[in-house]
Amino acid sequence: MHARLDRTHLRRWLAGTAAASAALAGVGLTGPAAQADPVEPPPECPAAFPVADLVRGDAVTGRTVTQGTTPEAFGGSVLGVLEDGISAGVDMVLVDLDSAEIDRVGIWSGMSGSPVYAADGRLIGAVAYSLGTGPSTVAGVTPATEMYRLLTPSASTALAPRTAAPLTGALQRTVARVADTGATTMRRMRVPVGLSGLGAERVRTLGPALNSQGVHLADAPAGAPSQQQIPVSAGSNMAASMAYGTLTAAAVGTATAVCGDEVLGFGHPMNFTGASTMSLHGATATHVQDDSVFGGFKVANLGAPVGTVDRDRLAGIRGSQGARPTEHDVRSVAVQGGESQTALTHVTVGSLIPELAFGNVVAAQDRVLDRIGGGQATTTWTVRGTRRDGTPFSYTRSNRYADPEDVSAATAIGLAEELMTVQDNPGEVVRITAVDSTTTLDDTYESYRIAKVQYLRGRTWTTLPSRSSAALKQGRSVRLRVTLTSREAANRTVETTVAVPARTAGRSGVLTVTGGGEGLYSSEEFFEDEEEFFEDAPAPSPETLPALLKSLTTAPANDEVVVSLRFNARGAAGKVRTVRGDADRVVGGLKFYSVRATR
């Protein structure tokens, strides 16, 4: 299957490999936030409390952050245990929580991972699930016994055997009454989404794609992570990032336990990939935003990376503090007049480079244009990577783009589609390791379409007929003149010459004249189209990638007129002859003409 970079891929970029309702990060307002009064912290890695020993009404305490970086205490009580409430063989502990902030907004997005302790200080588990979509004080807790399985054996505490303590019918009704809902279905807690590097207009445009994936788009400005390394402790903010920098795709939740260099958090998956290469960050919360429809959500700023999130499992995520994951830099420079803007995003999940490169280009170009609208752009990008055997590769491509509605999106689509083509090539698995692009923008939108094609017959320019065949002499070169018209600019012509092969007398053929930009995917199609089409892929071959890279670097540019001539003949006489002419503007249109060779 081959899919264009449509909304489906856009959702993958924004929602982070889709399917994960935990989704992306909340990143928010910059500046200092007030620090909450500190509470006496429990042990960072306490023993797990067996679920079977919980009794309805047992008092619980917990830790989470509402402002700044210092955890605050909350209280509550056990409602019961929902057997297989998370998955087959994994129970869910139900608790009713209270604090000034929980009483105000209910449990909130970004609270996922907040540790819940028994009276003796042992860890019951992490807040991870909520009842319904609106505000509620009832939380589903992922048992610590399940989360500790994510640790290395040397760091893990003894795991108690699973003994079900089912939630009775009466208790189910109690849960429904406390949550003010008629159902007891628990959902993973949402994580608020902020898009760094993109303006409010882009956020509004892309919001429906996000919300359709079951995530919550936080209407808050966003920024790149700071250079400050914010410590991660039990009950503090914890972020897992697929990319950070100008464009940040990271989920901010809460750390549940810190066992040596290992950190557990969230209590549910982020992308549910198992193994992971995300970066680990601390974060500073600005506040918890009230939301009567979806429930409250935390707004926070990421700190600098402090380690690697290497496990993304059903019971939560695990990070190791210290070594950071490999980063693949996507750098985009946008220039207009004397202004320039550079966007730099560090990607830790390499499979997302095409989508993140799209966003990075848009971020730089929107900033230097200071608007969203039509225009033209000339761009050059260099792509680097490694082949399956570790051999490095690179290629450079220059092109021109024009779009009447959104020139930033037009250039970004071109780059992203090429990256997807390279990454998904059928020959071998490759890794894209770096992308650099430079674009020069023009506010004025102009483009051409092919209006007519003439050939020089004797000394007279004659329009090629549309209903009959034009006679071309074999073994000679024929001069062509292509007339281009435009709504925005004066007409112009492009002249070129194509050779008619020898030994083709009496043979019929086809002359094709194409604008290099005829196949461009416009910004309007990008935001509206859901097109996917299927094609038969060739068998894997080590020759595929070199051939693909050559084709990318030698393919016609969008501002060229491409003439191809082919006769119905064998051998050299039937070989396609192709020539190009530069139009200095994006050219669309496609013309076919029947021809015949004469002596």
Image: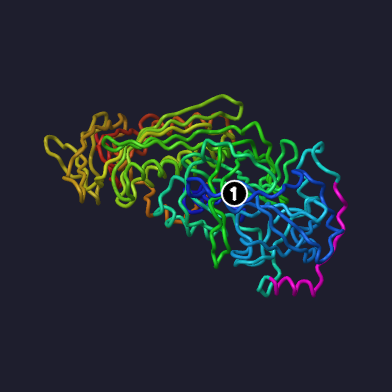
The residue shown at (42%, 45%) is 413
Q: Which residue is mark 1?
A: 252
- Image coordinates for residue 330, horizontal then vertical, percent: 47, 35
Horizontal side of 420 relative to 461 (left or right) equals: right
Verify whether residue 161 appears in magenta. Answer: yes
The residue shown at (41%, 41%) is 361
In terms of depth relative to the viewer, which is nearer, 9 or 559?
9
Badge 1 element: strand
Residue 211 visible at all: yes
Verify whether residue 407 appears in magenta. Answer: no
- Image coordinates for residue 153, horizontal then vertical, percent: 81, 38
All told, the count of numbered labels is 1
Q: Which residues are magenta?
A: 159-178
Horizontal side of 79 relative to 505 (left or right) equals: right
- Image coordinates for residue 403, horizontal then vertical, percent: 31, 48
- Image coordinates for residue 195, horizontal then vertical, percent: 48, 49
Residue 274 visible at all: no
Q: By what rule are the colours in the image chosen? A: rainbow
